[in-house]
Amino acid sequence: MKTNTWRLLAVLTTVLLVGTLAPGDRGQVATDSAVVTSMYGDVQVRHGAGGYAAAKLNEVLKPGDAIKTGADSRAEINVGNGGYVRMDADSQILVTYIRSNGLTSFKAVVGGIWVTLENALGGASQFEVSMPSAVASVKGTVFRCEVGEDGESSTYVYEGEVEVSVGDQVTRVKPNEYARVPRGLKLALAQMNLTFDDEQPWVTYNRHRDIIRHLGNPSVMVALSERGIGTELGSYVASAALAAELRRHGVMGASMTPADDANFAIGADGLVKWREKPSEDYCIVGGLKIQQVRELREGVFAARVAGRGILVEDGDTTPIASVEAVLPGVGDSAAGAVADALKKLGERLGQEMAPRLLKELMAQRPGTLRVDISGGTREQIAGLRKLITSLDGVLRTTPLRLPGQRLSLAVAGGLDAEDLQNAIRTVASDMVQTMSAHNNVLYVRFKEAGNADGAQATPPAQGVRPQADNRPRPIKDRG
């Protein structure tokens, strides 16, 4: 539930080599403006003292402008070459300065903020987030801030370091730590609960967006056909829910197409047969059918629907991935129960397909190297991320969680798989069991983690999950 009140002051100073760079080489944003680079849902912009109107892609924001998002809506603002401020649902930001004498300042009235600043911004860049109880200052990193309705201010750090100031006290917050400052009280530095954090939709969305920013926004056609389902309840509901779920995972170019217009058929062998090659980069096609509809009691109906989603590249016949699911639904009529089940089915297929699509993008498109990891402890994986991030030419590493708790790292930068393989082998060969490189993918398998006398560690009981406890674990203050 997100009804937190925010107050944000963002300061960005960047050295512009005016004498040596042509105007087109100075980044994507003019010195006196920011740009709305992606959005979905209800996003509105107000210019100056005017009224709010529906926002447009690539709309320019200048001092005195404001932008806000409605329920289940998000927006992304480019504040420089490699710098982004993202807004969660039910958020509002006022623009006060955009690089005026080196100052960029935003004031967030309400909502959630995620900040991504590439190392490419350079050592002279600085970005500050001012909250009721603290100020967070960085020079190229990834972090998010939260402010409670009571003024409690928290800063969560994912990459780089953030200096959090409370009065004259300055504390350095490192990756996987967060600083919590209750209003009127002292700062408490704590370790983030990564298991809990990984499950937050807002965190997942931003991590995926950071990957996609390096790969270009792929277009995805979603078209699910139905058997024995009226068109008003069939693929329209499930396909729209699937496309919406992809957008929640950062795939902004997802669109829904009625299956009857998609020019495809699925053979008994599972291959897709195209009558006309689609124009989209990727397609998710498949079929739906009702398994059961019954009346539970007067005015309450239950339904169960089954469906399959097949991910293919444009015009290909062989699936990249295939996902099947069976979901129940309830409603005050038979049609309502079926519609509820179809919506849930579309969401489930989208949740499964989104990371598979990003994994495929990382293997096929230049700009991001994919590192697939199996085995190993959280500490070993964190160490591998730190090693990769520290290498020359690497902008960032972003974790991509896959179904089954598998993990891939998206590595943005200039290294190829062979170079990265050699670097890891040099530093961490004692921890790695096997490692191989192929095109844009590096496969790393850690040695199995065991206990002190070499026995295999006992896995957790099936179905038992770590408690989502994000309470502070105190860390010694850093000045």
Image (spheres, rainbow, N blue to C red):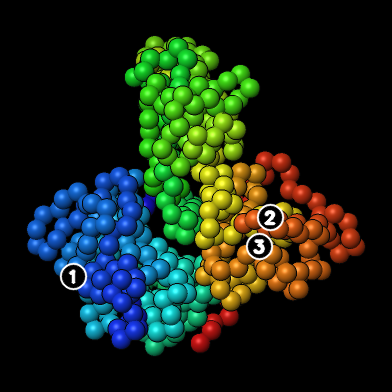
Q: CA distance from mark 3 to mark 1?
A: 44 Å
Instruction: From the image, tell me which residue sits under label 2.
Output: 438
Q: Nearer the viewer, residue 373 or 198?
A: 373
Give x and y (percent) for residue 112. 36, 59
Q: Which residue is mark 1?
A: 63
Secondary structure type for disc 3: helix
What's the amino acid at mark 3?
A: Ala
Q: Nearer the viewer, mark 3 or mark 1?
A: 3
| Mark 2–mark 3 CB contact (< 8 Å) | yes
In the displayed structure, would residue 43 be above or below residue 31?
A: above
Residue on which disc 3 sits: 417
In the drawing, does residue 28 fall left or right of residue 359?
A: left
Q: In this picture, is 132 found above or below 198?
A: below
- Specify the amino acid type for callout 1: Pro
Q: Residue 40 shows which numbered tag?
A: none
Does dot 1 land on a helix, a strand or a loop? loop
> Answer yes or no: do the residues labelled 2 and 1 have beta carbons within 8 Å?
no
